[in-house]
Every structure is written in C-alpha cells, then in structure tokens.
C-alpha cells in the first residue's frame, strides 16, 4: 500500500529530516513510527500524505506516485487518506457535527446520507451526544476523538495519525488506541507516530524506529 | 446535479453570512464601489444628454455672401430676390453698403467711419440654407462661389466641429475613467477578499488537507466578490439617480433660459444591465485573482 524508495527530504537551510529512507507498508498493517522528537516521524507522515514533497526518491501510495503528483490531483488523492493531527486542526466556528460533515461536503455528499455517516462516525468515537456543541467546549481527549471521527467519516483505506496520544493522560490514550485497533481489525491500514514506547508494547504491531531521519532496527 | 446545486447554494449562504458578519465594512466597501461605478457612468449619462440636446437644437447655419464692390446695389438686390427663390435656400436677407456702415456707427465706431474717404463695405447677403448637413452646405457654397458677382462666401461651421470634437473628447474621457475605476473596483474587491482569506486561513488549510479542490475553496469567495460588485453597481446606479434628481431643476432652468424645455434622461434598461454585469464581473475577477494568489502561496503545494 505504501512504498518508499530512497526517500530524502531536505528543508531549505539544509536540515535533512528524512535521509535515504526505504520501507514498505502492506495493506491492513498497523504500524507505529517511533523515535525522539525531530527524528522525522512527522515529516514521513507528511510525505506519505503529499503535504510535503520529497527532495529525492520515490513514494508510491495506492499505486500513485505521490512525489510527482500534479497539484489538481492532490485533493482526490487526499480523500482516500484519513489524517489525524496532534493539534487536531478543528474548526471552532462550527458545531461538532459540521466539523465531521466537512470531508463529506467536500466530496459532494449532502443530505440525509451524509448526516447518517456523520452520526455513525461520531458514535464510533463516543461523541454522538455532543454533535450540537462547539469543539472549544470539548476536553483534549474529546477533541482528539472528534479529529478521528472527521478522519474516518469518509471511510478511507489508510489512516495516518501524528502523535494522536501525545497530550492525553493514560486512560484517554488507551481509549484512542482501542479505537485504532478496532479500525485495523476491519481492514484499515494505520500508520501512527508516537514516542510512547509503553503503548507499543501493550498493543504490539510492527514498529519502525527512526533516528535523525534514518531507520534503526 | 442535486449535489451540485446544494454546493452552490451552500457557497452562496457562506458568502451571504460573511456580509452579515461585517455589516459596517461591507457598507463602506459598497459605498466606495458605488462611487467608482457612478463616476464614469454619471459622466456617460451627462454626455448622452448633451448629445441629445445638441441633436435637438437644429443648428442655424448661415452663409455670408460678400458681393463684389463694383456691382451696383440695385443688381445686388435683384440677386438676393433671385436667390430667395432657389430650391436649396430658405431665406435671404440683404444688408446693403449703407446699411452696413450705419450698423458700424450704431455700434460706436462712428469716429472710424467718419475718417474713411469712401464706404469700404460690400453689399452682403445672409443666406439660410434649407439643409444644414455638411455636404449640402459645401455644395451650396460652391455654387454661390461660382457666381460672377460673388467676392467671397464665408461659412460658419466651426462651432459644429468644436462641439463634435468636445463630444469625442468626452467619450474618450468616459472610457478612460471607466477603465481606471473598473480597475479600482477589482482592486477593492481583491483587497476585501484578501482580508477574508486571512480570517479563514485555518478553514482553508484544513479543507485542503482533507481533500478540497481549489474550486471548492474558491467558490464562496467568488460569490462574495460577484455579489459585492453587483450591489456596488446598484449603489452606483442609485447615486446617479439621486444626482440626476438633484440637478434636474437647475437643468430645467438653464433650458428655460435658452427658451427650450429639456428632460434629463437616465440610464436605459440595457445600459443598466451592462453596468451591473460589468461591476459583477469585475468583482468576481478581483476575487478570483485574490483567492488564486492565496491558494498558491499556502504551504502545502
């Protein structure tokens, strides 16, 4: 599903966030990206989602060469990926419901079909009762769950999560990991970056350890 | 198709909401656009009224025929009588040598005329032609010049030429003003849209990350720009109407002083549609450039 071949990402100024990295992630895998902060985890996720472009090397996702993708093709590519951000990136000027509706709306889905899917996604993350509230009134864990609901509402085959449990206490973090595990069991490919080693021990799955932009065993 | 309509309605709703959220700045922007629209269109209205007025007043063109000095006055008078029956001539009035010098004396030039050894003035015919088109005038004037007793024919068409030159200048001014202020309209819109984009930066960024096309992001802004242009155009039209109403009385007075009656005409329906169409288009264009520039400058390319 995801294939990186000798990928390097160098930022202006010379800092190399990812150096000559090659790896393959199969369909249906649950993969943890670990490493110290600044090891290149976030950059790697951004490269896979075509938010950043590689300086050199090839990235193929879903059979599409991401690095060479033209700008007009990007939106349609991103619709197949659920993105979960550490800072949530929620829109605070609209309700919980409307936040989750946005991806469907962008894809041209409206009306009762869309509403049904929004409620199903909210139900999965346990926020169904809060659909009318504003995100600002939610706790940190709830905001993260809302971000997850928005990522899965369009039923993507691939979900990328950048430090989804970073600012959460243990009980919340476990909640969220249980959710990811459930998605994985129905066939969703998940790539999760984290520096929480204990979490990985508890949930198993493959882990890719990065240090200074390179893979270490 | 339904989704497409729903999309557009939604964009329209967003655009309307943005007007509602900032009523004061919207009002000011509309006022500025209104003035920008009203200036060239107002000038245009003024010009078409002038054009109509100039067309309405049949210019009294006169030809002045000076008769050779050696021709006796009796013969000159006979010539006047003959010309008065000419098919191309409306009227002929005869001003004899003696009459001419009396007119000069009456005008306060008696000192000068008294010093003259003989009357230097020729017999003069003032001829009013039936037709005042330049071609007809030219033909008549040539015919008169060929007569044996004609010394000189003077035709006063300068003021017609001046008027048409002035009207041409006015029309060019309208074009120039319209072009400049049209540019200003687009720039004003681009600026308000730029501020909006700045306020909506988070939303645009999130939308891009979850797969929104540029078109999807652009649409509410384009609606906003177009609607702003349209309402601004209407405001401009209102300003012209009010301005016309304001000067109507004084125009009537001026017309009355010239012994004419004159109604100030406003923009016709076709002209109004053109005006509103143009202001809408310019608003839309301003928004388009502004959004496109912003979309390109956002980091995730």
Image (cartoon, rainbow, N blue to C red):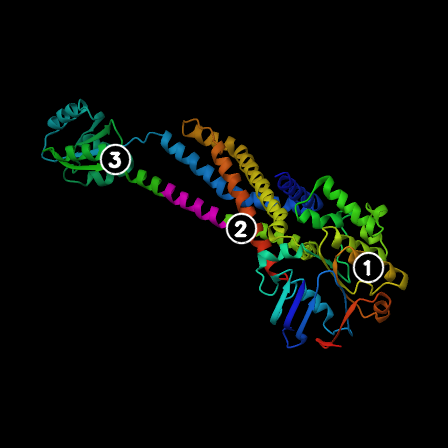
* Residue B62 painted magenta: no
Mark carried by residue A71:
none
Picture coordinates of residue A116, whole percent (x, y): 76, 43
Task: Say which residue label 2 marks.
Answer: B184
Evaluate if marks 3 and 1 touch, with contact meaning CB atoms under 8 Å apart: no
- CA–CA distance in space, label 3 to label 1: 95 Å
Circles 3 and 2 on the same chain: yes
Q: Residues within 10 Å of mark 2 (few under 14, many from 20)?
A: some
Residue at the spot 57% in from the left edge and 38% down from the top edge: B234
Task: Say which residue label 3 marks.
Answer: B134
Relative placement, left or right, of B224 versus A94 is left
Label 1: state its secondary structure: helix
Q: Nearer the viewer, residue B217 or B191?
A: B217
Of all chains, the one bearing label 1 is A
Label 3: state its secondary structure: helix
Q: Residues within 10 Å of mark 1 (few under 14, many from 20)?
A: some
User: Which quarter of the image is occupied by the C terminus of chain B?
Assistant: bottom right
- CA–CA distance in space, label 3 to label 2: 42 Å
Label 2: state its secondary structure: helix
Picture coordinates of residue A194, whole percent (x, y): 79, 68
Q: Please indicate, yes or no, whether residue A40 appears anywhere in the rendered image.
A: yes
Picture coordinates of residue B281, whole percent (x, y): 53, 44
Residue at the spot 11% in from the left edge and 27% down from the top edge: B75
Q: Please indicate, yes or no, whether residue A91 appears anywhere in the rendered image.
A: no
Circles 2 and 1 on the same chain: no
* Residue B178 painted magenta: yes
The boundaries of the magenta stretch are B166-180
Circles 3 and 1 on the same chain: no
Picture coordinates of residue A93, whole percent (x, y): 76, 50
- CA–CA distance in space, label 2 to label 1: 58 Å
Q: Nearer the viewer, residue B268 or A156?
A: A156
Relative placement, left or right, of A191 versus B244 is right
């Amino acid at each position: 599903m995801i294939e990186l071949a000798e990928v390097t990402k160098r930022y202006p100024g010379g800092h190399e966030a990812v150096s000559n990295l090659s790896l393959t992630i199969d369909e249906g895998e649950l993969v943890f990206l670990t490493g110290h902060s600044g090891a290149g985890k976030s950059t790697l996720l951004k490269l896979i989602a075509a938010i950043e472009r590689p300086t050199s090397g090839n990235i193929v996702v879903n059979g599409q060469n991401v690095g060479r993708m033209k700008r007009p093709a990007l939106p349609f590519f991103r619709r197949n990926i659920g993105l979960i951000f550490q800072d949530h990136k929620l829109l605070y000027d609209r309700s919980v419901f409307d936040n989750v509706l946005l991806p469907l709306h962008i894809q041209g889905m409206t009306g009762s079909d869309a509403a049904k899917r929004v409620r199903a996604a909210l139900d999965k993350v346990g926020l169904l009762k809060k659909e009318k509230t504003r995100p600002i009134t939610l706790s940190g864990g709830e905001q993260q769950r809302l971000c997850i609901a928005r990522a899965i509402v369009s039923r993507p085959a691939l979900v990328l999560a950048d430090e989804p449990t970073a600012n959460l206490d243990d009980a919340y973090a476990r909640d969220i990991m249980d959710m990811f595990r459930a998605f994985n069991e129905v066939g969703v490919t998940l790539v999760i970056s984290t520096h929480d080693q204990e979490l990985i021990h508890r949930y198993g799955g493959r882990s890719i350890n990065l240090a200074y932009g390179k893979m270490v065993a | 198709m339904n989704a497409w309509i729903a999309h557009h309605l939604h964009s329209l709703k967003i655009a309307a909401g943005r007007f509602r959220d900032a009523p004061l700045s919207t009002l000011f922007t509309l006022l500025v656009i209104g003035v920008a629209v009203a200036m060239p269109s107002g000038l245009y209205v003024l010009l078409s009224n002038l054009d109509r007025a100039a067309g309405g007043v049949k210019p009294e063109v006169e030809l002045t025929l000076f008769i050779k000095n050696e021709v006796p006055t009796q013969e000159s008078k006979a010539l006047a009588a003959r010309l008065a029956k000419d098919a191309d001539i409306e009227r002929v009035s005869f001003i004899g040598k003696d009459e001419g010098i009396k007119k000069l004396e009456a005008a306060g030039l008696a000192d000068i005329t008294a010093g003259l050894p003989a009357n230097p003035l020729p017999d003069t015919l003032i001829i009013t032609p039936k037709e005042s088109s330049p071609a007809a005038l030219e033909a008549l004037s040539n015919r008169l010049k060929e007569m044996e007793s004609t010394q000189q024919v003077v035709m006063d068409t300068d003021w017609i030429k001046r008027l048409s030159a002035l009207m041409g200048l006015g029309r060019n001014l309208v074009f120039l003003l319209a072009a400049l202020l049209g540019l200003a309209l687009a720039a004003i819109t681009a600026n308000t849209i730029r501020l909006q984009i700045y306020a909506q930066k988070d939303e645009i960024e999130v939308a891009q990350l979850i797969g929104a096309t540029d078109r999807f992001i652009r649409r509410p802004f384009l609606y906003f720009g177009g609607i702003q242009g349209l309402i601004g155009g209407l405001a401009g039209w209102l300003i012209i109407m009010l301005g016309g109403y304001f000067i109507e009385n004084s125009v009537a007075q001026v017309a009355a002083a010239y012994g004419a009656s004159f109604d100030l005409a406003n923009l016709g329906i076709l002209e109004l549609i053109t005006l509103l169409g143009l202001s809408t288009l310019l608003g839309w264009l301003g928004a388009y450039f502004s959004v496109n520039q912003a979309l390109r400058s956002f980091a995730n390319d």
